[in-house]
Amino acid sequence: MKILVCVKIIKGEINPFDASALECALTLSDDVTVVSMGPEKTKDALLPLTRLGAKVVLVSDEIYAGSDTLATSYILSEAIKKMEYDLILCGRQSVDGDTAQVGPMLSEKLRISLVTGAMSVERKSGSLKVRTRNEEEIVSVPALITVERGYVLRFPSIFSKLGDIKILNNSHIGCDEEKCGLKGSPTRVLKTFENTSGKRKCKFISYDELPDLVEKLRNTEKKEERSEDFPEKLKNVWAVGKEVIKKAEKIAKTVTLIEKLSPEEIFRKIEKEKPEFVLWNADLWGRKNAPVVASMLSTGLCADCTHLETDGKDLFMYRPAQGGNITAKIMCMTKPVMATVRTKQSSSDVIVSLGKGAKDSIEKAKELAKKLNAELGASRGLVDANLAPYEHQIGLTGKTVSPKVYIAIGISGAVHHTCAIEGADTVIAINPDKDARIFEYADYGIIHNF
């Protein structure tokens, strides 16, 4: 089986999700080719991968600089069309952009089947068995699969030798220059700024005070979400799925609800009716299908938006990047303007959420949740360790929640987690480390080894 692995180099290192995809490929085949797009200096970081037995191709040309996800997927697709392959593996997303768009867009441009979020991939009598967060699928090749961080990239053998890197520029690939780089990139970053939202003033209490405090907070009225009043609203916005209707209503005079149809059906509706603005929910379904439709339309897509604003003419989208450390303000230069939007995915009054720091006390935490009549949540670390199901995951790559009370147990407070709990009325953090970052984002803190 010939496998291509799309790899991005970030600050001299292979993107962690792509490293997982490469290890997955090496477990499946001895015929693996790494394909990376970047400046020629990227070859220094790619060269060690040849010691793993993989062939390496670097797609590099000055006209590719500044490409967004749509332009990147176009360039990669044109390069890959000149290669032989049965299977393409990509990391689910890059840790700098966090869009998870290139894989789905690439599958559409190559017209091959797509599976996203694979935890494991196995060969099975001429096909592939793929286990995702939610199900198992049997996939025939050719196919493109995006891979979670479930694999650890092996070290090369001490007897291995460095190989060669093949560099392809546009004279080899023949891309339309109007579709490359900034020219071919419909999304524009207008500005970026440090993400400091969500910080709170923490009051420390004892663990014994927790039950009474939770009961008191449960019986208070839910805080109303801040609603912005835009002097001018967009004339009409399409909402793909009912989950994003409320988000659309804040920026539009009228909202058109579109059912969650197949990408092909939604593409045909958009082509026929020509909406200017389309919102999708940033759940697993939206993250998989919205990029496919955007690729079909050759339009821009802003991923995982946490905030939207408008002047009545244009839509401005805000999204976290670099693991949530910064927020980017983005607009799209093409129509329709499309965005996946983070919505609140829990209606519980109280959530007890566990991190890796509580991995040895999961049953105790479940008992606490039962006692408080609370929903269970989890950090990505706990889910990636297969100690909690994906539907419990709260964070940048999970769900966003806004309960009356959010109890974080053994959670360090990384920004990709705290950005998803900003809507909670009250955050209570339980952690034995008094210097844990989570206390900066909590209303109440409990120094306790749970």
Image: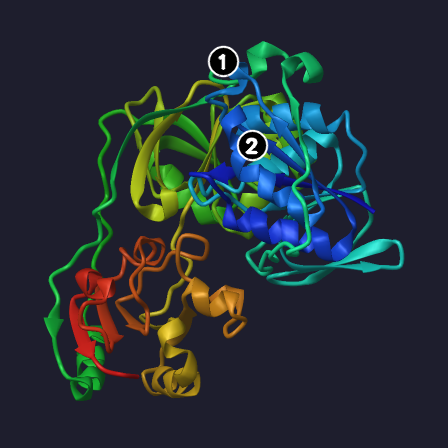
From the viewer's side, name the closer residue of 417 and 158. 158
Image position, residue 219 (x, y; %) = 21, 75
Image position, residue 396 (x, y; %) = 40, 52
> CA–CA distance between discs 1 and 2?
25 Å
Tag on residue 418? none
Residue that numbered label 1 is attached to: 183
Tag on residue 43? 2
**Left or right position of 296 against 411:** right
From the viewer's side, name the closer residue of 148 and 390. 148
Instruction: Name the quadrant containing residue 199.
Output: bottom left
Kindly identify the amino acid type of the residue bearing the numbered disc 2: Lys
The disc, 1 or 2, on the residue closer to the chain's N-terminal end is: 2
Is residue 147 at all visible to an observer of this figure? Answer: no
Q: In this figure, what is the number of numbered marks?
A: 2
Check the picture and name the quadrant holding the C terminus.
Answer: bottom left
**Left or right position of 286 against 436:** right
Q: Residue at x 59, y 27 (%)?
A: 270
Instruction: Name the quadrant containing residue 400.
Output: bottom left
Q: Residue at x 58, y 11 (%)?
A: 177
The local crowd at label 2, few if under 14, some if 14 to 19, many if 20 or more residues have their Cα within 10 Å, is many
SS label for mark 2: helix
Image position, residue 449 (x, y; %) = 27, 83
Kindly identify the amino acid type of the residue bearing the numbered disc 1: Lys
